Image: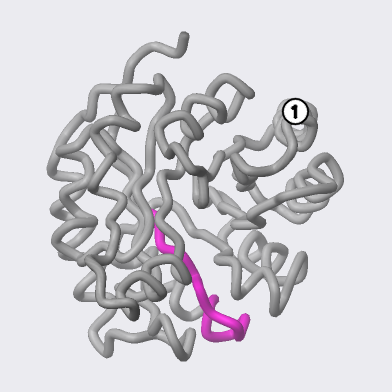
Amino acid sequence: MRPIVQISLDLTDIKEALATAELARRAGVDWLEAGTPLILAEGLHGVRALRERFPDVPIVADLKTMDGGYLEAEMMAKAGATHVVVMARAHEETLKCVVQAGRDHGVKVMGDNLGCPDMVAGAKLLEDAGCDFVIHHIGYDERRGIAAAGHRMPSPLDQLREVVAAVSVPVQAVGGLTLEQAVRTPEYGAPLVVIGAPLAVDADAFRTADSNLEGTLRLICDRVHGYGEVAVKARR
């Protein structure tokens, strides 16, 4: 699989999100993500605005769905999302509902293992439920809380190779990665590289963080796309 660069628009203002998306596309970014802050601030209107501005670009709606799975996925699909996100810790029926909605409405389902006691088992559960992608995710609050307690901050790289080995679908690693770590995730077998808070967006203010973001993203895209194909196992 050719590596993909995705920018997470973890912003709360649609005008800023659209401007950031414009420069990201100029820099070579492949996918746009309506990040959770944007979903909370703008909802379906934000996804519709992204679809109107970028009619042919994949758009991920980071819903972090825990309940009402079919309805949430259906609404985002109709607004223009091509990918929706459901949590592994949702009820198994919710996972089934989101996957069914994905099939019915032609959107891909990304399953997020954030908060799973066993992250590898969580990834397997998501694949077995029918998710098309796995997001291996160490959460914002978790990272900050552990660091504040004086302990080493956990990283998705800690178990990334194990997660990749456990599933057949493409994997994305999210949560506290440096830019250098993020662009190296294809080396671990995870071809979906996401750039968001705190790399492109200030994690506290939820505003664009890098004054030369377009140049930074261009370097990231050149490097990630330069990896060539990343092996992804045939789905079981």
Asked where in the image residue 199 lies, by quadrant, the reply is bottom left
The residue to which callout 1 is attached is: 96
Determine whether, in the image, residue 103 is placed left or right of residue 221. right
At a point 62% along the width and 55% down the height, the residue shown is 61
Residue 40 placement (x, y as % from top left): 70, 73
Identity, as a three-letter code, of the amino acid under mark 1: Lys
Q: Identify the image's colour scheme: rainbow, by chain, secondary structure or one colour.
A: one colour
Q: Is residue 118 magenta?
A: no
Residue 37: x, y in percent?
60, 74
| Residue 13 forms part of the magenta stretch | yes
Which residues are drawn in magenta? 6-18
Q: Is residue 190 above or below residue 78?
A: above
| x and y, in percent, of residue 64 in the image | 64, 54
> Front-most of 84 and 139?
139
Q: Is residue 201 left or right of residue 222?
A: right
Image quadrant holding the N terminus, namely top left
The residue sitting at 84% across, 47% down in the picture is 68
Q: Nearer the viewer, residue 40 or 52?
A: 40
Residue, x 62% and y 74% (percent of image)?
Answer: 38
Q: Quadrant of residue 106?
A: top right
